[in-house]
Image (spheres, rainbow, N blue to C red):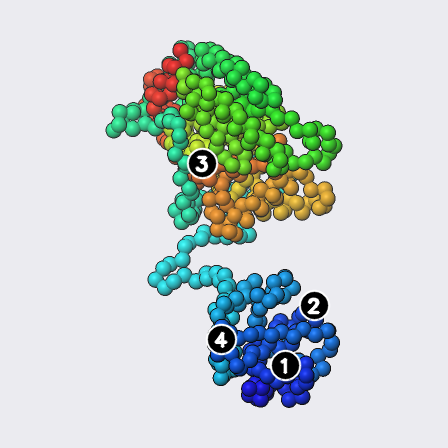
Amino acid sequence: MFHDFSTYLQDCKYDVTDEYDDDEHPRTGTWLEFLPATVPSGRLHLISYHPKLQTASEYMLKVTVAAPRCLVYPTDRAAMRLASALRISLSNLFSTASFRRQLHATGVRSIDPVIFRNSLEKTLEAHRSSNRANLIRKVIDDKCPAGISPPVIPLEHHAGHDEPLPKASSVLSAESQSLQPLAPARRAQRKARSSSQVAAPHPQTAKYPQLQWHADEATGRPEQTPWLKYLASDCKTSDAISRLDAEIRALEVYMTPTPSEQGEIDRLVADVGRLLAGIVPSQPQVTGSWRTRFALSHSDLDFVLPVPDSDRSTRGVRKPSATRPKVLQTYKKLLRDVGHALQQCPSFAGRVQILGNRFPVLSAIHRPTGRLLQFHCGEGLPASVEYIMDYQAEYPSTRPLYVTARLILEARGRYGRPRLSIGSDALVMLLVAFLKMNHGRFQRPDCLGEQLIAFLRAYGTDVDLATTGVSVDPPSWFNASTVKRASALYAPDDLPAHLRGQRSLISLKRTAAARRNLSAASRLCVQDPTNYMNDLGRSCVRTSELQDAFSLAHDRLGASLRHWDDSGQAADASILTRALQANFHDFENLRAKSL
C-alpha cells in the first residue's frame, strides 16, 4: 500500500521516498487524508487505517501530533502540499476557527466518506468531487436568456449620467448665474423615459376614504365652478389675463376655511390636548398648513408631540443625531401610548393607525367631522413653519398660486403622500423657488394669471424634475454637473453648506440609478432650506406624472385664454374651469359637517 502511494505521488511530481519509516511512523496503513497545512499547536502527520477492519464505518482514524519541528523529510513536504491542495477539513476533530480554512466558508462534512479500499487514486478523486460539490458560489449573470429582450435602461438613468439643466428664465443667484445655460428638457423625452422605466409602485390603498375631485360627465360628476360667485361684483376685466387673475383670487377665497370651520379646528385642538394630558410630556402643538395659514377647508390637522432631548440640549456645536435609534424608540413608544388613548375615545375608536417604520406617524380620523389628524414626535415646532410664513410675507402671491396648483393636482390624483406624490411643504417650496428666480419679472398688479402660466410651464416642460433638484435658498435648479462646477469655485474646506447638501442629494439619486432603482432615482428633489441635507420631495416618486399634470393644465389654460378673448369676453365664462376640471361635491359634503 505504501509503495503504491509513493508511486502515485511520484506520478504527481511529489518527491517521496521510503526513508520515512521509524517507530514513530510505521508503514502499517494507507494514507487517506491529510490535515490542513497550517497547524498552530504542533505538527500533524498522517491518518492511517488498519486493514484488519472489515467495513468503512469501522475504520479507526489515528492522528499523531508531534512537537513543532522543521519539515525535513520530503514526505512531510509532499503531505502538506497535497493536504493544502485538497482542502480537506476534519470538522469532527478540529472545531476552532484556526482549523476552518475553507473556501467561501464551505467545508466538507461528509458523514460516510467514499473510500475505495484497494484504490487510493479513486478515493482521492471521490474526495475531490465531494469538495467541488460543496463549494457554493453566488454568480450574477447579466446575460439575458435567448428569446428574451433585456430591459431598456434609459441613458439618463445610467450611473454618472447628468441631463443638462434648462436655461432658467429668471434672475438666479450669483452662483447659478456663473454656470453655463443649458438646453430645456423636452416633453417627448420625458414621456419616452416614463414609458420605458419601471413603473412606480402603486399608492397604498388608503384605509380612510379620500375626497374625490375628478369630473366625469358619464358618472354624473360634471365640472363645477363654485368660485365664480366670489368674484367681485364690480370686477371689470380688460383682457383674459386679468380675468384669470380675478378667478384665482376668487378660488382662494372659496377654499379658505370659514369661521365655523376655524372654530371646529380650535375645539378639536382643545379636545386633543385634554385627551392626551398626562400621556405626552408637553402639550401637543399644531403644525403644518393650519399653523402656516396655508390650510384649505379640507386640509389635515397636524400635531407635533414635543419630546425633550437632554443630550442635544446640553451639547455644544456637535450634537448627537435627532434621529438616533434611542430617540426613535422613544418616539415609537409615545405614539403607541397616544394611539391607545385615542382608541379609547368614541370619536376616534377603530380609526387609529400608525404608519411608517423609520419615521412613524400616527393617523386618526375624527368621526364627527371626518377630518384626518396626524401626530409625529420631535423636539418642537419644525423650523420650516417660520420659513414658510416669512416667504408668504415676502411673496403674497404664494398662497393663491398654491391653492390653484394644489387643486390642479388633486383633480388628477397627483397630490399627497397617500398617492406617492408631492406634499404641502414641497409644493410651497416649488412656488417660492419659482417666485425667487423670477423676482421682478411680473410688474402688473393683477399678475397672478401670468405667474400661474409661467409656473406651470417651468415645472411642466422647461425642467426635468426627475434628474434636476430645486433649491430655495439660494434659488436655483441643480444637478450633478452644476454642483461639480460650482464646487470647483471653492476650496474643499470652504464649500458652502447648500452645495454640500446638493452634492449629498444628487449622490443619493446617482446611487439609486446605479442600482437600477428607477423610482428612487427619479423621485422629486426639493432641498429643504432649513436643513440642506433634507429632501422635502422624497415622498413623490410619480415625478413624470406630476409634470404631465402641470403641462396639461398649462396647455388647457392657454387654450381657455384664447377662447375667452375670441368669445367677446363673456361675463359668465370661466377660464380656470378647463385647467382644473374638478367636481366639488365631496368637498361641499365635508364642509357641511362643520356647519
Mark 1 and mark 4 residues within 8 Å of each other at the beta carbon: no
Mark nearer the N terminus (3 vs 1) = 1
> In this figure, which residue is indicated by the disc labeled 1?
78
> In this figure, which residue is indicated by the disc labeled 4?
56
Identify the image quadrant of the N terminus. Answer: bottom right
Give me the disc on residue 40: 2
Near-viewer residue (16 or 584): 16
Near-viewer residue (396 or 1): 1
Q: Position of residue 279 (x, y in %)?
A: 57, 21
Q: Is residue 555 visible?
A: no
Question: Is 71 on the left-hand or right-hand side of 442?
Answer: right
Label 2, label 1: how many angstroms apart (C-alpha)? Answer: 19 Å
Mark nearer the N terminus (2 vs 1) = 2
Mark nearer the N terminus (1 vs 4) = 4
Q: Nearer the viewer, mark 2 or mark 1?
A: 2
Q: Position of residue 16 (x, y in %)?
A: 63, 86
Within 10 Å of disc 2 (Cα), the crowding (few <14, some 14-19, many 20+) is few
Mark 2 and mark 3 residues within 8 Å of each other at the beta carbon: no
Identify the image quadrant of the C terminus. Answer: top left
Label 2, label 3: how many angstroms apart (C-alpha)? Answer: 60 Å
Label 2, label 4: how many angstroms apart (C-alpha)? Answer: 30 Å
Mark nearer the N terminus (2 vs 3) = 2
Q: Amino acid at mark 3?
A: Leu
Give me the disc on residue 420: 3
Give me the disc on residue 172: none
Q: Amino acid at mark 4?
A: Ala
